[in-house]
Image: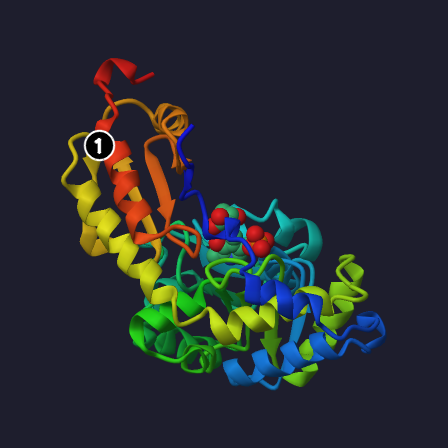
Amino acid sequence: MAKIIDLRSDTITLPTPGMRQAMAAAEVGDDVFGEDPTVRALEVRTAAWLGKEAALFVVSGTMANQVAVRTHTEPGDEVILEANAHIYYYEGGGAAALSGAQCRCLPGRRGRFSAAEVEAVLRPADPHFPPARLICLENTHNRGGGSIWPIEQIAELAGLARRRGLRMHLDGARLWNASVATGIPEREYAAHFDSLSVCFSKGLGAPVGSAVAGTREFIARARRFRKQFGGGMRQAGIIAAGALYALEHQRARLAEDHANAQTLAHGLAKLPGIEMDPATVETNIVCFRVKYACAAQWIKQLNAAGVRLLAISADTLRAVTHLNVSAEEVKLALDVIAAQKFNSEMLP
Ligand code: TLP
């Protein structure tokens, strides 16, 4: 069988030879005792990169977000976010289960919403109402198709949050992509937030690991919740070394993923049966609607032909470009997609 071209997610990326070497050579210690020098180095480097006082290494983006939500809130507090936000949509009900938070979902446009829309749902202090505590944004926005938040719009939301006594958290799993695409450094985005999460294990290509960053005080409290959630790790320097390597050596190449996503989007836009506006593709995520046959049938048929995509709704597919897919393979994937036969009789 021909080589499989796996565009399901940038989470499937494999460690590079240089990364494996760095991991094998990592100095380690017991990180729960604060004795792992490589974890420490990664936390210090990440905090500096993001312009925050401190950072905490965690196993996943989900844990980074959920530790942050728990650190900001008490049970019964309201968290305002967009209806397709990863924190709400894809984290197993974590905000409710782990923090007892009530999520107030706003409808977004490709994941984005305005300060006026938040203001419209804020309620006065009154025993009837849960106190609104936290606003969460996602940049880039996954289900928004890798969309980037304009920094002016973030600044407006941060201004509102300050005036109304709310905190701001950024799910920055793919903040690197936003920064590489816009040229706006991560720290400039981060400056508008009290806390943010970042992932080393998506486009950057590390096998495991994310971080949450914020003030020293915030991170000290977050460290307790990481332990409570079972996320205290021991000789974690082995994986932290991969993350550190990813940050130092594999960030700039994200521009290649963005260029490959453009090739894919423009190619898809020409195919019958696909609804795709390439202007909506801003980073490495390409979401498109299929007209004939449901998304699940497309997935099945493409899988058999060696191209893997993800169905993110009944009629929408997602392709993500990454480290392990070359420009050549993206063109090959397009040929495979173009060769498929679908018709409206296949609709359920
Ligand atoms: N997203 C995954 C799936 O969970 C959908 C993917 O394939 O894109 N924030 C954002 C914006 C994410 O996209 C993800 C992962 C996470 C957080 C969670 O990261 P992990 O998978 O490390 O828990």
Q: Is residue 123 visible?
A: no
Q: Is mark 1 within 8 Å of ligand 1?
A: no
Q: Quadrant of residue 119?
A: bottom left
Measured from the top left, where is residue 330 in percent x and y?
Answer: 30, 46
Q: Which color scheme is applied?
A: rainbow
Q: Quadrant of residue 177?
A: bottom left
Identify the residue at image location x=59%, y=73%.
Answer: 244
Identify the residue at image location x=58%, y=49%.
Answer: 91
Left or right, residue 205 beside residue 325: right
Q: Secondary structure at mark 1?
A: helix
Identify the residue at image location x=65%, y=78%.
Answer: 43
Q: Nearer the viewer, residue 300 or 147?
A: 300
For disc 1, the neighbor class at 10 Å (few under 14, some 14 to 19, many from 20) is some
Identify the residue at image location x=27%, y=59%.
Answer: 259
Measured from the top left, where is residue 32 in percent x and y?
Answer: 82, 70
Quadrant in which the N terminus appears: top left
Measured from the top left, where is residue 11 in percent x and y?
Answer: 51, 51
Measured from the top left, where is residue 199 in percent x and y?
Answer: 54, 63
Q: Is residue 300 visible?
A: yes
Above or below for 170 versus 229: below
Which residue is under mark 1? 338
Q: Nearer the viewer, residue 270 or 56?
A: 270
Q: Quadrant of residue 132?
A: bottom right
Left or right, residue 122 beside residue 144: right
Left or right, residue 219 beside residue 318: right
Q: Nearer the viewer, residue 252 or 158?
A: 252
Above or below for 265 versus 34: above
Q: How many tags in the picture?
A: 1
Which amino acid lies under the numbered mark 1 shown in the image of this protein?
Ala
Quadrant in which the C terminus appears: top left
